Image (cartoon, helix red, strand yellow):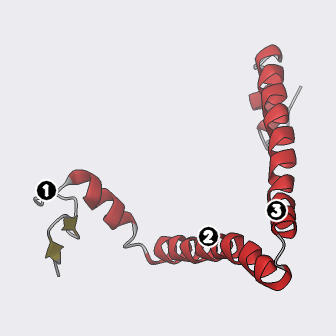
Amino acid sequence: MLLREPGLCFCRAEGMPGRQGEERVLTVLRRRDFALLWFAGLVSLTGDWMLVVALPVTVYKLTGSALATGGVLIANKLPALVLGSVAGALAVLGGLMALRIDRAPRPRAADPRPVRV
């Protein structure tokens, strides 16, 4: 069954008229497992952002203190700031190491078959 609305295309990509980019996106969401994963991620992110908004509002309503509200906001974002900086530095270091290491032995080391000499 084809459902068509202005701006949306729920048809298949096999030669049917419509916008190609939208067809590809919606075709992927037809796979049940992927659609469940995608919607679960959407629900999870929605809950995360609701917490980001609700927690400072609740602290302000309970304490009436802007300082306490700011402390909650800082405590909420500080781990991401610190760990994000460390992860970025490790990514740069890993990239530099990858450029300096000889690439020839790596495929052989990753091969699960035993090496015969």
| Left or right: residue 90 compared with residue 10 | right
User: Can you tell which of label 1 and label 3 is closer to the viewer?
Assistant: 3
Instruction: Give the labeled residue for mark 3.
Output: 70
User: Can you tell which of label 2 and label 3 is closer to the viewer?
Assistant: 3
**Between 77 and 29, the one nearer to me in the picture:** 77
Residue reaching furthest to the left: 17
Q: Are marks 2 and 3 in contact (CB under 8 Å)?
A: no
**Between 79 and 111, the one nearer to me in the picture:** 79
Seen in the picture, residue 112 relative to 37 is either above or below; the reply is above
Residue found at x 17% / y 82% = 1
Residue found at x 82% / y 62% = 70
Is residue 105 at least partly visible in the picture? Answer: no
| Cα distance in 3D space between marks 1 and 3 | 55 Å
Q: Position of residue 43 (x, y in %)?
A: 57, 77
Q: Position of residue 41 (x, y in %)?
A: 59, 71
Residue found at x 76% / y 20% = 103
Seen in the picture, residue 9 relative to 43 is either above or below; the reply is above
Instruction: Give the labeled residue for mark 1.
Output: 15
Instruction: Give the labeled residue for mark 2.
Output: 45
| Left or right: residue 37 compared with residue 10 | right
Number of marks drawn: 3
Q: The residue under label 1 is which amino acid type?
A: Gly
Q: Position of residue 105 (x, y in %)?
A: 81, 23
User: Can you tell which of label 1 and label 2 is closer to the viewer?
Assistant: 2
**Between 91 and 54, the one nearer to me in the picture:** 54
Label ID, residue 113: none
Q: Assign a secondary structure to mark 1.
A: loop
Dot 2 or dot 3, earlier in sequence: 2
Seen in the picture, residue 61 relative to 86 is either above or below; the reply is below
Q: The residue under label 2 is which amino acid type?
A: Leu
Seen in the picture, residue 54 relative to 69 is either above or below; the reply is below
